[in-house]
Image (tube, coloured by chain):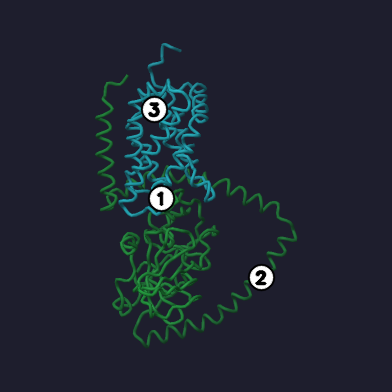
Chain colours: A cyan, B green
Amino acid sequence: MRINSERPAGTGVILVTFLLAALLEVVPLNDTLNWVRPEWMLLVLLYWVLSLPHRIGVLWGFMVGLYQDVLVGTTLGQWALAYALGAYFMLAAYKRMRVFPLLQQSAVVFLLVGSAQLLAYLIQESVGRTFYPPYTILYSAAASAVIWRPMCGLLRWVQLRFLVR
Amino acid sequence: MSSANPTYRLLIALVLAVVLIGLDQRSRWVDPLRYVLGYITAPVQYLAHLPVDAGNSFMRLTETRTRLMESRERLERQVLILEQKVQRLAVLQAENTRLRELLNSSANLDASVLVAEIIGVDPDPNRQELVINKGARDEVTQGQAVLDSEGLIGQVVETGPLSARVLLITDASHAMSVQVNRNGVRAILAGTGQGSRLRLLYVPDTADIREGDLLVSTGLGKLYPRGYPVARVVSVNHQSGASFSDIEAQPTAHLDRVSHVLLVQSMEPVSAPDMNADGGAEASATEGADANQ
């Protein structure tokens, strides 16, 4: 197994995880739960960047973001920009991130998701499509930080089970 | 390890994204890209709606006989009432056409409709949008008016191949021209960003608008058909010192409960004299944003 470890494998599995994230992104929730809907697509993206930094990076972020833009009907490029930046920062920090303790990892995820959302909020604000004040995105960022660890465990299992590398 | 520097890739991505945002805001050049991506986003929307669908069909399967009988009886009563209304409508319509002929203005209230199911709600609380299960392949076009049985819901703002997005009248960036059914006073009805609350903008303190007034669409912006109920006035506050009164309305359509909507298919242009009367009153989605500030 070590022999082929350099050759990428399991792109299909990665795509499926993104599709599942997309599903969770649009699944209907009631008004209260809607506020704390984690940023699933970004979380999955961050996980893959963290575990496969040689493959999944800024361009993946851009593409996934573009998909997210069409999925939720925002200005084309809004989430693409935010996700590309998120992937970039994760790429810059993945070595440290891997040795961080649990709480610190969640804090980094909170910051990354929060800043990506803030960026998207600013773009949305500039086209006049915001209504609630910007601090409301914190709920979702906090939910993302909380869900990060369990989601990592799940994706880790998927990665080992389907030999994604 | 890849040799390409992620910073360069980031720069490329940033430039590309900014160009996309600019193009999307200022032109329609990126619409084909959005359309193509619609082929892979729509299935996700359909899938996300599946549990709701399954729940509904389960409820149908387990419905008791008495419940079915009850609903059948209720529907029969409803049909009777509606039929009686239609009888009167035929006469009124004929009369209306005759009177309009006298006034030399064309009239066509008839429009064919397409029924669509709501398969998604925008997850972003900042925006009031819906996703429906009919798209460009079913000849849904941008700007089409969307109704439910009780009144106007909104307009189609984006068409994918298999689905379309509907901007609700309650969205903060939406505004449209309406008139009071009782006396024909015109005003701009703007969304507030909250479900089930609308505001009338720039209404002078002396205007004759009362609580309970029905607001109907005027068709002035050429976007919405004329004469559909939109909202009902719920409160009128005259503020001393302010130049406009503060009027709130509630949509007649059940925006939060509706599951099927009607898309108005063929839009007849409203008559020319009407258009000249107050051509700029209705604002489209983007113009409405300015009116709101």
**Placement of B182 over or under B248, stated as above or below:** below
Give the residue type that dot 1 points to: Pro
In the rendered image, the residue lying farthest to the bottom is: B102
Q: Nearer the viewer, residue A126 or A154?
A: A126
Residue A82 locus on image (x, y percent): 34, 39
- Looking at the image, do the residues carrying marks 2 and 1 touch, with CB atoms under 8 Å apart? no
The quarter of the picture where residue B111 lies is bottom left
Q: Are discs 3 and 1 both within one chain? A: no
Marking on residue B161: 1
Give the residue type that dot 3 points to: Val
Letter of the chain that mark 1 sits on in the rendering: B
What is the CA distance from the residue labelled 2 to the residue labelled 3?
60 Å
Marking on residue A49: 3
Secondary structure under the numbered disc 1 in the rendered image: loop
What is the CA distance from the residue labelled 3 to the residue labelled 1?
32 Å
What is the CA distance from the residue labelled 2 to the residue labelled 1?
37 Å
Secondary structure under the numbered disc 2 in the rendered image: helix
In the rendered image, the residue lying farthest to the top is: A3
Mark 2 or mark 3, whichever is nearer to me: 3
* Residue located beneath label 2 in the image: B76
Residue B39 locus on image (x, y percent): 41, 44
Q: Nearer the viewer, residue B137 or A146?
A: A146
Residue B163 locus on image (x, y percent): 44, 51
Give the residue type that dot 2 points to: Glu
Q: Quadrant of the C terminus of chain B?
A: bottom left
In the rendered image, the residue lying farthest to the right is: B66
Q: Nearer the viewer, residue B88 or A138?
A: A138
Letter of the chain that mark 3 sits on in the rendering: A
